[in-house]
Image: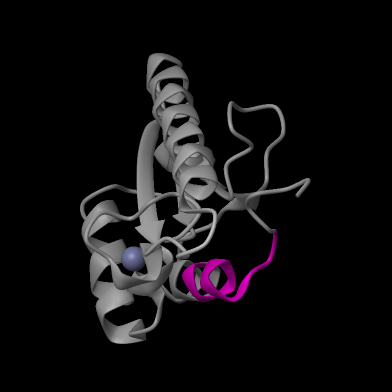
Amino acid sequence: MARIRGKNTRPEIAVRRVLHALGLRFRLHRRSLPGCPDIVLPKHRTVVFVQGCFWHGHDGCRRSALPKSNSRFWAEKIRRNRARDVLTGKALRAAGWRVRYVWECQTRDLVRLRRRLSTFFRGRRA
Ligand SMILES: [Zn+2]
């Protein structure tokens, strides 16, 4: 599997729509930044990663349950993804970025998603 994180996935588009509705302006998939963040808000010096619950091992989420077969393989793969997420987050923060994560399962309910995202950016002037 070449790419873990697909581009323009449904959860990502949901997040983009809500950010847009909140009047926030952003760019997508900046390869120049560590981890090629899904969404970059330069004025807020913030990046947003929209994380697949399975691929990034969302703790306690039913979508992150490992398949019964090859579970060792999957556990190792997801462990590595998470380790990389930690390193990416550190590198971005070290470069002065705020890093926010939205889990795939948090993008189903748009009202709650909007509340969550507006909390992230509350009081931060664009
Ligand atoms: Zn989840």
Q: Which residues are magenta?
A: 7-15
Q: Position of residue 38 (x, y in %)?
A: 59, 50
Q: How is the image coloured?
A: one colour
Left-right relation of 89 to 60? right
Left-right relation of 107 to 73? left
Tell which of 55 and 49 is nearer to you: 55
Q: Position of residue 11 (x, y in %)?
A: 52, 72
Tell which of 75 and 57 is nearer to you: 75
Query: Is residue 46 depicted above or below 106 in this figure?
Result: above
Tell which of 61 and 23 is nearer to you: 61
Left-right relation of 1 to 99? right
Q: Residue at x 21, y 51 (%)?
A: 123
Tell which of 39 and 2 is nearer to you: 2
Query: Is residue 42 depicted above or below 95 in this figure?
Result: below
Query: Is 96 part of what is drawn in magenta?
Result: no
Query: Which quadrant of the figure has residue 105?
Result: bottom left
Query: Is 9 part of what is drawn in magenta?
Result: yes
Ligand 1 visible in quadrant: bottom left
Q: Position of residue 52 (x, y in %)?
A: 49, 60
